[in-house]
Image: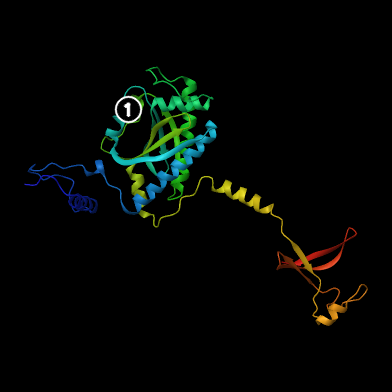
């Protein structure tokens, strides 16, 4: 008897479970034991596309944020993503840790922002003007200053997560607190699924470490109602737009006022001499065309302004 299910069979079972065709309660005779498919729930379709946009957008935003507060180039890339139960995820943290507790206004419960003590120490060192080249930290506790600075870093990362999430769905993340003792983390149901996004942080000083954002799967489920594949906004798009506008506004263009036109035979043009008068046939107070780079853009009337000949614009 074949004991391993194919991927198609697993997908069919998951779909049947979601639709209610498969009962969660085992038969009364006890001949079967239910398997918790939610512990490794797959992400697909629109949900997968949208959460990938959140992952990529968060990485870009965090790179810009960390570069700004550290004042040297920091790269943040999308390292990996997977689903994991909350129990298995939190079991990875033993002893000293650095975990941010996040909340989201869409659902109850918490999300987690976790980085190793080494990465936290290195980022704090970079913020203070160091090189971030520190030895593996010992088992000492974080100082009060280090906790405050780690919180500032995590609050900024939380803000970038909110911006990235906002490009695909409504919702706002808030930073609650930072914990350095895993025993003080809020209680969770061990089998609650999380969507785990890993990010690689690299600096020009040789730093290369990961941090993780783990989102409750209920958030991913909320993406089912979203349609399409919206483009994620570049965190610096507005800054680039301002720079582009300023650059365009400094470009010099030629402006010509056409006071009148007339057609003359070549023989009359060849006979013109100083003192001759060319009559255009246009009334003195008639509107004149204003050309920008040879194209008619405005109209106006000739006059005098502060002792100089001028054109008053009357229409766009």
Residue at image point 35% right, 46% down: 220
Label 1 element class? loop
Residue placed most toward the observer, 11 or 2: 2
- For the point 54% across and 35% down, the residue is 68
Q: Residue 27 location, x and y as percent?
A: 11, 45
The foreground one among 187 and 268 is: 268
Q: Position of residue 183 (x, y in %)?
A: 33, 24
In the rendered image, residue 89, in percent from the top left (x then y), is placed at 30, 33
Within 10 Å of disc 1 (Cα), the crowding (few <14, some 14-19, many 20+) is: some
Horizontal placement of 76 versus 297: left or right? left
Which residue is most to the right? 275
The reply to whether residue 148 is in sight is no
| Nearer to me, 108 or 53 | 53
- Location of the C terminus by quadrant is bottom right
Question: Measured from the top left, where is residue 28 in percent x and y?
Answer: 9, 44
Coloring basis for residues: rainbow
Front residue of this view, candidates 178 and 242: 242
- Identify the residue shown where x is 81% and y is 64%: 312
Count of numbered circles on the image: 1
Q: Is residue 94 above or below residue 295?
A: above
Residue 18 can be seen in this image: yes
Task: Say whether residue 288 is left or right of residue 37.
Answer: right
Q: Which residue is mark 1?
A: 93
Up/down of 131 relative to 213, above or below: above
Query: Along the horizontal axis of the image, is 308 left or right of 31?
Result: right
């Amino acid at each position: 008897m074949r004991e391993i299910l194919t991927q198609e069979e697993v997908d069919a079972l998951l779909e049947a479970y979601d639709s209610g065709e498969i009962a969660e309660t085992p038969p009364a005779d006890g001949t079967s034991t239910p398997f918790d498919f939610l512990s490794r729930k797959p992400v697909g379709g629109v949900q997968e596309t949208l959460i990938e946009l959140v992952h990529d957008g968060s990485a870009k935003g965090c790179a810009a944020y960390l570069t700004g507060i550290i004042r040297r180039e920091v790269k943040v890339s999308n390292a990996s993503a997977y689903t994991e139960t909350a129990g298995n995820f939190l079991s990875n943290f033993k002893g000293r840790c650095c975990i941010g507790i996040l909340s989201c206004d869409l659902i109850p419960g918490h999300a987690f922002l976790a980085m190793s003590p080494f990465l936290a120490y290195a980022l704090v060192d970079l913020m203070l003007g160091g090189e971030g080249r520190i030895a593996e930290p010992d088992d000492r506790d974080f100082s009060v200053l280090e906790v405050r600075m780690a919180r500032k870093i995590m609050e900024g990362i939380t803000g970038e997560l909110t911006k990235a999430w906002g490009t695909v769905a409504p919702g706002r993340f808030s930073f609650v607190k930072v914990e350095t003792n895993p025993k003080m983390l809020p209680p969770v149901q061990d089998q609650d699924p999380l969507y785990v996004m890993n990010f690689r942080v690299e600096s020009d000083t040789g730093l290369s470490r990961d941090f993780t954002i783990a989102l409750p799967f209920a958030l991913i489920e909320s993406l089912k109602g979203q349609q399409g594949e919206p483009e994620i906004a570049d965190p610096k798009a507005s800054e680039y737009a301002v720079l582009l506008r300023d650059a365009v506004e400094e470009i010099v263009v030629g402006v010509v006022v056409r006071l009148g036109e007339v057609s003359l035979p070549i023989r009359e043009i060849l006979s013109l001499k100083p003192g001759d008068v060319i009559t255009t046939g246009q009334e003195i107070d008639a509107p004149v065309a204003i050309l920008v780079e040879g194209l008619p853009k405005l109209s106006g009337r000739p006059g005098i302004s502060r002792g100089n000949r001028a054109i008053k614009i009357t229409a766009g």
